Image: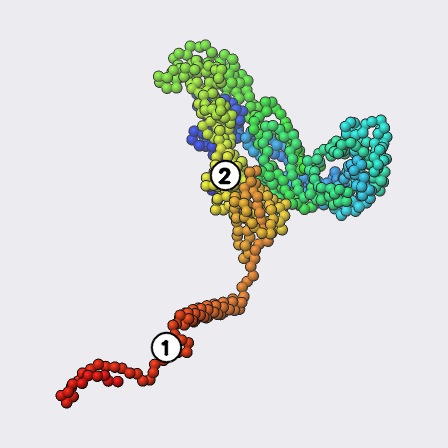
Amino acid sequence: MPRAPAPLYACLLGLCALLPRLAGLNICTSGSATSCEECLLIHPKCAWCSKEDFGSPRSITSRCDLRANLVKNGCGGEIESPASSFHVLRSLPLSSKGSGSAGWDVIQMTPQEIAVNLRPGDKTTFQLQVRQVEDYPVDLYYLMDLSLSMKDDLDNIRSLGTKLAEEMRKLTSNFRLGFGSFVDKDISPFSYTAPRYQTNPCIGYKLFPNCVPSFGFRHLLPLTDRVDSFNEEVRKQRVSRNRDAPEGGFDAVLQAAVCKNFTALIPGTTVEILDGDSKNIIQLIINAYNSIRSKVELSVWDQPEDLNLFFTATCQDGVSYPGQRKCEGLKIGDTASFEVSLEARSCPSRHTEHVFALRPVGFRDSLEVGVTYNCTCGCSVGLEPNSARCNGSGTYVCGLCECSPGYLGTRCECQDGENQSVYQNLCREAEGKPLCSGRGDCSCNQCSCFESEFGKIYGPFCECDNFSCARNKGVLCSGHGECHCGECKCHAGYIGDNCNCSTDISTCRGRDGQICSERGHCLCGQCQCTEPGAFGEMCEKCPTCPDACSTKRDCVECLLLHSGKPDNQTCHSLCRDEVITWVDTIVKDDQEAVLCFYKTAKDCVMMFTYVELPSGKSNLTVLREPECGNTPNAMTILLAVVGSILLVGLALLAIWKLLVTIHDRREFAKFQSERSRARYEMASNPLYRKPISTHTVDFTFNKFNKSYNGTVD
């Protein structure tokens, strides 16, 4: 289970213990503790020094301090600091197998009796174990509805006893059966109350004209191991008739519980769906038995009001679950362990002993816890009336003198009314300040503080009171601390100027042990989310966080490992806030759905989506099986590549051929067009030329001094 970082975790756990040591927060040294008992109530770390000559003669507050400080200041061994403790009174070993007809000698829980002595604010912790033993006795009381609609069911269960006994003996050798029946209240409007229906309410009903009178509940057969008696009693039964559809089943269950003393077992009941004709009744009973026997849950009976209880369960997986008192997924013979811590919030007004019980739901076994309160000091037993240490005018107790009426002083050395004006400066906190801070009279060189309707004024110079402190919503110190001399001294587990901030981090710790899901800080008992996009009581909701999918992945992997069964203890913890839906194909049709996927150890891909619901849970849609691809074949790839190249070459060749054909056709069409436009006869060839041609040239020349003009061919 994930844990917070060790240094931070240790610091948080130790915060309360460190508070009394911090400067200004040592509430033990406050001026309010005027006796040993008052000192013990301030904080569980506070101790009282009962040494006679310890501390300042002007103040009694120094006697109440941390133990280490008292020892450092010379108190020695006269220190009163009791601690909470427990003592096991009875612890019989767990049984390994059931025995006896009623199971009273079977031990399924240990210890059985514990005595606890508590000092307020100081926890004490003990362990207990619960085991589901093999062959534990089973008592089954069959309560039958005998209204007319159950006639076919009655026919089917007439041999139920024999079949049921055969199946249950596979689970336990100690099995008893009982039988009862009910119809409905025999008054209007539930039943037919007219005189003619008194003996036969089925008169006039054609389908079934005869039946017995209506009744509320009948206890017919006490628990017995005689199966034939059960079968015989069932065969005697006849149905009746009532008016309204709902029968008096709830009344009958309560009456049966009273008759058979089942009231202690009702919290461990289970619910199943019965077929219309009750054919699956045996299987339902077996399922219910297995369901009840597969889990252990502690219940608290008669818990005192001033007592806090804290549980930690350790189940079969060996993991501790703080704040949980239930284990599931157990098998017969498994043992569940629980750590129980007790803390008293205060002391009773008088000497009181409380007794409460821890009991596994559905078990006879229980642990009886007797609680006493350690609210007195041992030194109070040896008080000395009229002690010489108090000048014969007071009682010496725990290192102090409680003066008789009319006497004052740390040793009762002065009488009230004596003139002590020469010592009045001893009643000033500082030079120039009023006597006793103006809130008391100076007598016998010490201040006697006035009474106030607002509270108590105290201190060597009446400089302090218990009402001038910060308030929260009108409540002094938020109700979680005491006002001391203008400053709130917070109770264990609270800090702040007005003690409104709780230091308890258990309210910020999820079931997985993480503080605020590691997305925020625990402040005053509440998570302050620091991760952008995180929200929720534990900052557990964060759709935009980088690890949003990884938090859901743990749940998905657990479900896949356990074949989708969320009832496994580990899966139940990881998937506690998930609503699981299994699908064959992921279809992301929701705009708010976040798609997540990851690679499994077998190189498969697992996908799921989730949507945050208003209830605080998540709707998780998960593939039934991861998507896995086959390993590629090298020869297949080679042939595919070669084939692709050939196909591309053929395609290019075909394209070239197509382009050439198109070009030729266009040229031929052009030739045909030009031929059709020619202006010559078809019999002549415009390109033909005769081999002989005639050319005429005009010229003039002179021959024998004669001129000639003509042409030459």
- Return the x and y of residue 435 as percentages of the image width and height: 40, 15
Report the front residue among 45 and 689: 689
Relative to 438, 98 lies left or right: right
**2 vs 1, front mark:** 1
- Return the x and y of residue 208 as percentages of the image width and height: 84, 37
- Return the x and y of residue 607 as percentages of the image width and height: 55, 51
**Count of numbered circles on the image:** 2
Quarter of the figure with residue 146: top right
- Residue 535 is tagged as 2
**Measured along the vertical axis of the image, is residue 695 above or below residue 311?**
below
Quarter of the figure with residue 347: top right
Report the front residue among 418 and 104: 104
Q: Residue at x 54, y 57 (%)?
A: 603
Please tell me how crowded label 2 is: few (under 14), some (14-19), or many (20+) other residues with Cα within 10 Å: some
**Measured along the vertical axis of the image, is residue 57 above or below residue 3?**
above
Report the front residue among 593 and 63: 593
Q: Residue at x 53, y 67 (%)?
A: 636
Relative to 558, 474 lies left or right: left
Whether residue 573 is visible here, answered yes or no, is no
Question: Which badge, 2 or 1, is on the more N-terminal residue?
Answer: 2
The extreme left residue here reads 705
Residue picked out by circle 1? 686
- Disc 1 marks a residue whose amino acid type is Pro
Q: CA distance from mark 2 to mark 1?
A: 98 Å
- Could you say whether the residue bearing mark 2 is in a helix, strand or loop? loop
Q: Residue at x 55, y 23 (%)?
A: 380
The C terminus lies in which quarter of the figure?
Answer: bottom left
Please tell me how crowded label 1 is: few (under 14), some (14-19), or many (20+) other residues with Cα within 10 Å: few
- Disc 2 marks a residue whose amino acid type is Phe
- Return the x and y of residue 55 as percentages of the image width and height: 45, 25
